[in-house]
Image (spheres, rainbow, N blue to C red):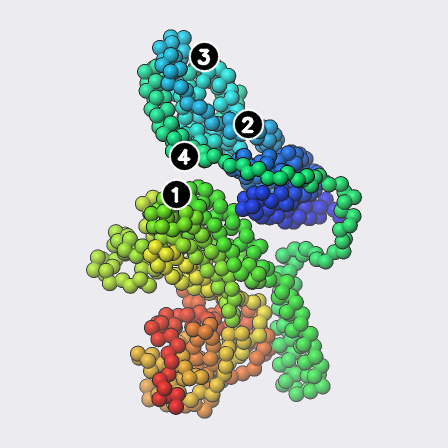
Amino acid sequence: MSQKDDIKLYFSEAEDLIQSIEENILSLEEDFKNDKFIQNLFFAYHTLKGMSAMVGFENLSKFCHSFETFLDKNKEYDERVSKKDNFLGLLFESLDIVKEAINSTKSGKSKDLDGKILQQIDDTFGTYETEYEITFFQPIPSDLLDNVKDKKDLKFYKIFIELQSTCVFKKVRLFIIFRALNKIGRICSSNPDPDVLEKGNFDNRFEILFMSNNDSNQITAVLNEILEIENKVINEISNAVFYKEVTDFNLKYNVKLEKGDVRSEIEIKKTTKTEAADISIEIDDLASIDSKITSVKVNIETLETLMDYFGELVILKNQLNQILKERQDWKYSRLFDNMDKLFLEIQEIIFKLKLVRVDTTFRKYKRLVRDLAKETNKNINLILEGMEVEIDRKVLEELNSPLIHMLRNAVYHGIEDPKERNITKKSPSGFIKLKTYRRAGSVYIEVTDDGRGLNFELIRQKAIKKGLYTTDEAMELTSEELKKIIFLPGFTTLQGADEISGRGMGLAIVAEKIEELGGSVDIISEKGVGTTFKLDVPFTRAILKAQLFKVGKDLFAIPIENINQIYFFKRELIDYVKGEEHYRLEKKLVPFIRLDEYLDFLPQVSKEASEVDKTNSQTKIVIWCKKDENESAAFLIDQILQQIEVVIKPFRSKYSKFQEILGVTITGDGSICLILDVLNIISSKMKRVKEVDLVEIPQQIKN
């Protein structure tokens, strides 16, 4: 195997290990007592260390070794419980370091983990035992402050420091800065507060009040020795100003201490200590593991090439079938039928190769929600359902961006903060549920939160303010119409934008992307209860079986999986409900769609001739297509043809609003055939007759 092949294999294996590491950290956060997750992390980093060394990533290998040592020292619950938040924070920060290092080397931006970052990591692990002392300091007692305020040999300073944006371990850098300054003086206050700095929840800038016998040049010299300081401003202030500001800080901070806002006490429960299993293992221990290879990894490009070639084979197969039918060569036709059965088997196998379980992507959202919850000071639990559902890899990739925007929207707009939830007598912890399921030819994804729900009145007022509607027009808007407004680009009910919620573009991106996929978005919301965003996306396949038919002289197809039943057209089965044509099928009235009219394919004929054509049922056919149990439609066509395997070529464009065509294909005789997206057509039709839905036929009609 060449060095290039080794590198490709390394990145493939490393990505799997990173995903495993993230899942185990998230699991450890939920069940902090479980040492199994620590063992799993140790094994993952141990493996990554060996792999990194083999391909020449020495610094990354050293990082993994340092992390192994760190995990080994904290493998027992009693050793890590007192610093749970710091411990978990370090795990997540280290994971981000590994991700960034591997992505940078994969893209060619760097050849290995930066040596400076590696030194920071060593400092981090070295100072972990005194983590609470990194930025946390006790306010100077009032009696001591009174004694020093009039000392003439002391100088008082207000120091502003900005760290570089590339600083990875901010808490470690703070520790180094605070330690250096405390050697030549005393830090008496900080802005943000010490507890905020301790958690690393600041935007790289902070300010401190500092007293020392040294002048500003000496302080500057000390700070110049410290790496990753982008900017610093040292201003000498009077003792009166210093005394007042420090006194104000002490009063405010002592109040927080009394309320218990600075740091909650950690209760350590004494448990019977059993001998923990040693995390370090010998290579010989792996001898008992079954070495039989049960799966292999295949490059995505290879799969795509295989699908393209097989698609061309299907077109050639259809052409061969057409020739055999025209020649009526039954001997070769029988041979072809036997070959066709093998084609179908191969097609299903290839199709399954393109399917991936949604959990491969959706489990990564746990980290996203966790980080967003911490940034917004909210308690949120992400619940995943239907993770076993498999969909086309390309569809899953396209859904990633919309789902991230929807999860961000749920965190920022949906879930309330603990104080607000307490007022409304809700649990302090909110939840977001990501549910996936399949029905017929569609994949449904629901993003539900138990938050405040949509504020329709606020949406109405914002629409008026932005000039979208006049006051009178806005007051006439229904809840369904108000729901559509929030998908408009730039529309937001927030006063300002931030890096979480954006500028009102998130839901607009969701709507655009789902429309490109030929799907739809529905919203169910109740004030004070929560909101559900329901995505409906076609379960697209590159190759599928379709029913061919004609409308006039034009050739169309509908995927077989969308067809419920096919009937001869009977004029007497048509009824009208609120001015809309419906067709009577199995004791129900379903919306009736004349495809020639719907697609505007009607020939230029007289009104009388058109009416005669409408009543002619000699050759017309009705195809009943179902989206789900509540939504279906009957399609009127002119001529039914055969069923064939078709290769779908993309037809949609994001620059066109026409979404009724799923794709285009070539039949055996070389004809161009448009494949209808009947699910999209049904959704559009049902929106117009939503007050009817599937109307039950009165008893007298049934009889």
Q: CA distance from mark 1 to mark 2?
A: 34 Å
Q: Residues within 10 Å of mark 4 (few under 14, many from 20)?
A: few
Residue at screen point 36% across, 86% down? 699
Determine contact: label 2, label 4, CB under 8 Å. Answer: no
Label 1: which secondary element: loop
Of the two numbered discs 4 and 1 in the rendering, the one whose residue sits closer to the viewer = 4
5 lies left or right of 81: right
Q: Vertical placement of 119 versus 274: above or below?
A: above
Residue at screen point 78% across, 44% down? 284
Of the two numbered discs 1 and 2 in the rendering, the one whose residue sits closer to the viewer = 2
Q: Position of residue 122 (x, y in %)?
A: 61, 30
Q: Quadrant of residue 684?
A: bottom left
Amino acid beneath label 2:
Thr
For mark 4, what is the residue? 261
Amino acid beneath label 1:
Asp
Residue in front for this viewpoint, 133 or 174:
133
Label 4: which secondary element: loop
For mark 1, what is the residue? 498
Q: Vertical placement of 274 versus 311: above or below?
A: above
